[in-house]
Image (spheres, rainbow, N blue to C red):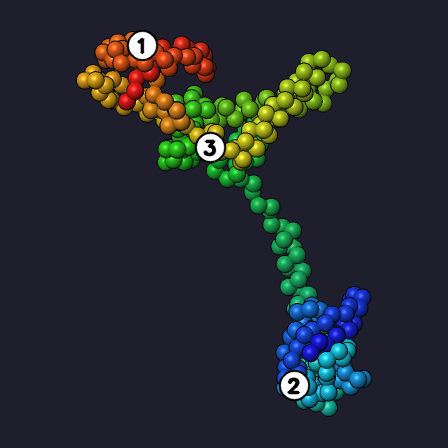
């Protein structure tokens, strides 16, 4: 049977949806279907039919008199937490903190003790010196812990062959200094700090100064280059990898030849001098003559069929 549900949530406007259910379906399962359609938790759903709430979740819908084409109302009930109950009902709540026993000063002494402790902790915080800042290299900006230590950085790079190979490619003088034990990292950091200070000075100088404008333009251009490189390293990291050239020793017509392997080549190319040395010029089919175009242009005299 088809039952129409008129839903009235508390936090949004009313909605209406239809459910095709069986009369033997229990009310708890019907509530679960309404939860999926309306988004209201099952514990907050109240179903009303013919102005009578349906409360027994184990009864079938047919036992409530529901039939095909009927309309039920779904209301969202407010879930209120149960009030906290005292361990001794009926006993009035009494604040015992203000009660003092005659002849004693326990209440005032406790308050006085707490006040003394607060004053002592406050004075101790005022007297204690601030924590000492970690030592930094002169002329260098703040950096992660350990990266401003040349010796530690040398150990890290020497323990990582891959990073050391990249350093050899991008900064050969620094790599040579690390391998020789001559630590010039501090000098490079100081030089970089001086260049940064000079750049900031020029940026804050006369805006009509041609030299300052040229420096600003170069700084913007370098920033764009660095940003473009960062994007390229994220999107196409394979373009920054190193390609290993593969050369193999082979024998052509009984002659030893060193060949270069190109996995993307469409055909094998041999120079005319190599073909003469291998004594295969007699097998050249000149009907396949043409022009090879790539980085340059070279004439193709023919083809040797294998």
Residue 248 is situated, as x and y percent measured from the top left of the image, at 27, 23
Q: Residue at the location (54% across, 31% down)?
A: 232
Residue 260 is situated, as x and y percent measured from the top left of the image, at 32, 21
Q: What residue sits right under mark 1 in the picture?
A: 272
Q: Residue at the location (63% across, 58% down)?
A: 121
Q: What residue sits right under mark 3 in the picture?
A: 238
Q: Nearer the viewer, residue 42 or 248?
A: 248
Q: Residue at the location (65% across, 55% down)?
A: 123
| Residue situated furthest left in the rendering | 254
- Disc 2 on helix, strand or loop? loop
Return the disc, 3 or 2, that comes first in the chain's sequence: 2
Q: Which marked residue is nearer to the observer: mark 3 or mark 2?
A: 2
Q: What residue sits right under mark 2 in the picture?
A: 60
Please identify the quadrant where the N terminus is shown.
bottom right
- Disc 3 on helix, strand or loop? helix
From the viewer's perspective, is residue 285 above or below residue 180? above
How far separated are the C-alphas under marks 1 and 3? 36 Å
């Amino acid at each position: 049977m088809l039952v129409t549900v008129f839903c009235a949530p508390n936090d949004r406007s009313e909605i209406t949806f239809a459910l095709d259910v069986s009369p033997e379906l229990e009310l708890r399962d019907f509530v679960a279907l309404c939860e999926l359609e309306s988004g209201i938790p099952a514990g907050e759903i109240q179903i009303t039919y013919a102005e009578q709430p349906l409360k027994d979740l184990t009864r079938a819908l047919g036992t409530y008199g529901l039939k095909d084409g009927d309309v039920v109302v779904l209301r969202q009930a407010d879930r209120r937490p149960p009030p906290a109950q005292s361990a001794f009902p009926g006993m009035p709540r009494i604040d015992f903190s203000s009660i003092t026993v005659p002849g004693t000063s326990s209440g005032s002494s406790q308050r006085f003790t707490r006040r003394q402790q607060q004053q002592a902790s406050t004075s101790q915080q005022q007297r204690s010196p601030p924590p000492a800042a970690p030592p930094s290299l002169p002329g260098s900006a703040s950096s992660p812990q350990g990266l401003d230590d040349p010796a530690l950085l040398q150990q890290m790079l020497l323990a990582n062959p891959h990073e050391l190979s990249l350093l050899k490619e991008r900064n050969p003088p620094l790599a040579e200094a690390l391998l020789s034990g001559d630590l010039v990292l501090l000098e490079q950091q100081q030089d970089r700090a001086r260049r940064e200070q000079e750049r900031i000075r020029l940026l804050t100088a006369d805006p009509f100064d041609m030299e300052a404008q040229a420096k600003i333009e170069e700084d913007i251009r370098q920033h764009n280059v660095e940003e473009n490189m960062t994007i390229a390293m994220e999107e196409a990291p394979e373009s920054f990898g190193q390609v290993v050239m593969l050369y193999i020793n082979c024998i052509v017509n009984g002659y030893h030849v060193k060949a270069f392997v190109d996995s993307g080549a469409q055909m094998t190319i041999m120079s005319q001098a190599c073909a003469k040395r291998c004594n295969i010029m007699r097998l050249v089919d000149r009907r396949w003559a043409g022009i090879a175009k790539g980085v340059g242009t070279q004439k193709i005299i023919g083809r040797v069929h294998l």
